[in-house]
Amino acid sequence: MNSIGLKMEGIVKDFPGVRALDHVDFIVNKGEIHGLLGENGAGKTTLMSVLCGLYRAEAGSVYLHDSNTDSEREVVISTPREAIVCGVGMVHQHFRLVQSQTVLENCILGIRDTNLVVDYKAIEKDIIELGKRYGMEINPEAYIWELSVGEQQRVEILKMLYRDAEILIMDEPTAVLTPQEARLLGETMKLMAIEDKTIVFITHKLDEVIEFTHRSTVLRDGKNVSTVDTGNTTKRELANLMVGRDVVFSIVRPNISPGDYVMEMRGVSVYDSRGVQTLKDIDIDVKSGEILGVAGVSGNGQKELAEVATGLVGCKNGSIYIGGRDMSDSSAGKFIKAGVSHIPGDRIGVGLVGNLPVSDNLILKSYQIKEICGGLLFNQRFVHEYVDRLIDEYEVVTPGRDTLARNLSGGNQQKMVLAREIESTYRCYDDTRLIVAVYPTRGLDVGATEFVRSRLVKQCSEGAGILMVSDDLEEIIAISTRIAVMYSGYIVDVVKADCVTLEDLGMLMAGERPIDEI
Amino acid sequence: MQIVDIAFWASVLSIAMAAGTSLVYAAVGEIFAEKSGVLNLGVEGMMIMGAVTGFAAAYHSGNVLIGVVTGGIVGGFMALIHCFVTITLLADQVVSGLAVTLLGGGLASFLGQRLGVDGTPLVGLIGPRLLEIPIPYMSDIAYIGDVLFNRDMMTYLLYIVVPLVAFYIRRTRPGLFLRAVGENPQAADVMGVDVVKCRYFYTVMGGVFAGLGGVHLSLSYTPGWTESITGGRGWIAVALVIFATWDPIRSVFGALLFGGVNAIQFRMQAVGTNVPAALLNMLPYLLTIVVLVIITYFEGLRKKLGAPDALGLPYIREERV
């Protein structure tokens, strides 16, 4: 096509304990819409944050197009300000807008060559003109909080265009848009590409990649897997590149026939504090002796689903039954009594009290048991026995029961959570048991992962029903009985785990039903 | 009968002006800091440090101007402590602010014992003071002439400073950056505004203003140094910022109201009306709570008038979400 607009070479970025970007090369031409694809944690946003000066890379260099020489020139971008000066503008997934200010004020934020007393009238004209040119008309005097999500996004784009950004990075821009708005955005991007701007389009939606982009780059585990011409590829091939890896995993799913319903959700809808619907008409159930895996790109409602299943969030519409009891209006405490255990995704923030010792953490949920606490005082002797038994049975490696929870390694912390949650389920008033496990093996080493999985499967074989949210597709396939795939708040499909492939799941996660099913 | 007398209200207003000046300085300073997202509860400490050093400097130099400048600078230095602890070290702003207040109180009392002649106490010394400068002709206007145009230099200065600050925050480029940093530092940062620098600057500026408020007490309102000369005015200023919904102009009216409460109380006693003093002293805080309830309850009002969104929150750029 034509000259190179952006070239990143050998970018390395480390986060504590993880290499997020491993010598990534990334080239985008001028006038091109370039899709940037990958699973969560593949490094898409990190790569772009390096380009924007939000993160500093450990190694690697960045070249941008220099219009004077019509060739690329190396630049050093270490602060957001330098990125803007270089003409790099990013439309963040979570908008960077000042809610209490107007569109105009947001557009000129950070620009230093206006008059000291800002001449809003002149700028207003420019903004309106710019909006017309790119088909993004907006009232410049409106306050951001008065605008819809789609309109706010236009402001984000406009403010970058207003400062003559030559490179526009759109981080999952369509995730928050309605299909109509997404189409409009596509038109806008095409207009910008015609004007020779360089556009990086991060997305999970394969349809949009095919429809909008000229070329695409797929990242996986912090590496550039492949850059392809979108015209010569298919959705299936892209899905393959995103998730596909040669995996050998052992299937260890429980093999007892499912029993009664442990949990049923019927028509559950949930709205967040801003009124955005996060769960849409969810219909799922878990039987005893069954693991229902929940797959999906994170942020598509899995967190909310787990919160409803554990009673942390009440369902506005629809109902939830635990062991046949209607629990729609019940508190988390009642859910626990009904036999629900929760292994939260955020084990340090929610799962444990870091500044309390191991023993206190292990009895956090069992304090109502007579033997542990008869009246006001703990029965220390019993507590010690109980705690030592759990430490032993769950192979928690700790200097002692008085060690603070935060001083243990992640794997041992997770084993503690597991021990507490599994043991507390033995003590409810009937034998219904539901374990809600959210990212149960995230960040664990191989040994701990194996341990957690086998314990979950064991519980299942003993009659518990398990709802497991995970972003590790292999794990989901390996231990689930059935798999529910979530996408933008609804369940795309529930499939049997023994007759599904990673690629099928990848397609479902992108909101696509596999072709052979339609 | 006497309570509806114009002369009575004019004299109340006159005292309110004198008492309110230090409040306006402190409140405008705190508005600067809070607009940038830094809650500084050290106002009381910064004021009292300004008061003691300002008086000492004026006493030894015999020049009130030197006193005023000294008080401002010392206030700024006190704020710098708060900046370093909360903006650089990211400590809790409430804790640090309270520490500045306690530190300032203690340090001022210590200095008050030795800043006199040859290390003797300052208490009881009579130094130069800011004199009322009647403006010719205008001060002769019936009633309001004395209230508005027979004041000291620092009060006159506010006639210019307050509208200027209000305009600066609302209409100028740096004012826009300031508001953005307090509302959404992430957004300001990605748009190329230096959040740390901005917060340092305005918080120190707030300290300077608080110091000036303190100086006004020891050089004009109650000339001389006495222990706990500020008597909780720093806290009234913090409340005043909320009462004025972070607006400098409204803070003037609030200051007159809050400053006038005491005056009314004395006058009312003089004419034999029996409103308990404690009740009147409570009024500023009660009104602040009322305002807070109103602007929090109505969503539209909260967005237009409420506290800056990022008030009290430390900002770090490289934070993984």
Image (cartoon, coloured by chain):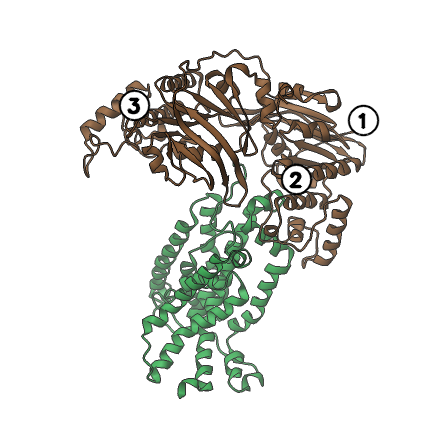
Chain colours: A brown, B green
Mark 1–mark 3 CB contact (< 8 Å): no
Residue A53, how many percent across, how many down? 62, 36
* The one of A375 and A15 positioned closer to us in this rendering: A375
Between the residue at mark 1 and the residue at mark 3, the CA separation in whole angstroms equals 63 Å
Residue A54, how many percent across, how many down? 59, 36
The residue pinned by badge 2 equals A82
Which callout, 3 or 2, points to the residue nearer the camera? Answer: 3
Host chain of mark 1: A
* The one of A221 and B208 positioned closer to us in this rendering: A221
> In percent of the image, x 51 and y 44: which residue is there?
B315
B179 to the left or right of A320:
right
The secondary element bearing badge 2 is classed as helix
The residue pinned by badge 1 equals A1
Q: Earlier in the sequence, mark 1 or mark 3?
A: 1
Query: Mark 3 and mark 2, same subunit?
Result: yes
Which callout, 1 or 2, points to the residue nearer the camera? Answer: 1
Q: Is residue B313 above or below residue A69?
A: below
Going by the numbered disc 2, the residue's amino acid type is Glu
Query: Mark 1 and mark 2, same subunit?
Result: yes
Mark 1–mark 2 CB contact (< 8 Å): no
B260 to the left or right of A146:
left
Residue A50, how many percent across, how many down? 61, 32
- Near mark 3 (Cα within 10 A), the count class, few <14, some 14-19 or many ≥20, is few
Query: Mark 1 and mark 3, same subunit?
Result: yes
Going by the numbered disc 1, the residue's amino acid type is Met
A222 to the left or right of A294:
right
The disc at residue A198 is: none
Host chain of mark 3: A
The secondary element bearing badge 1 is classed as loop
The disc at residue A399 is: 3
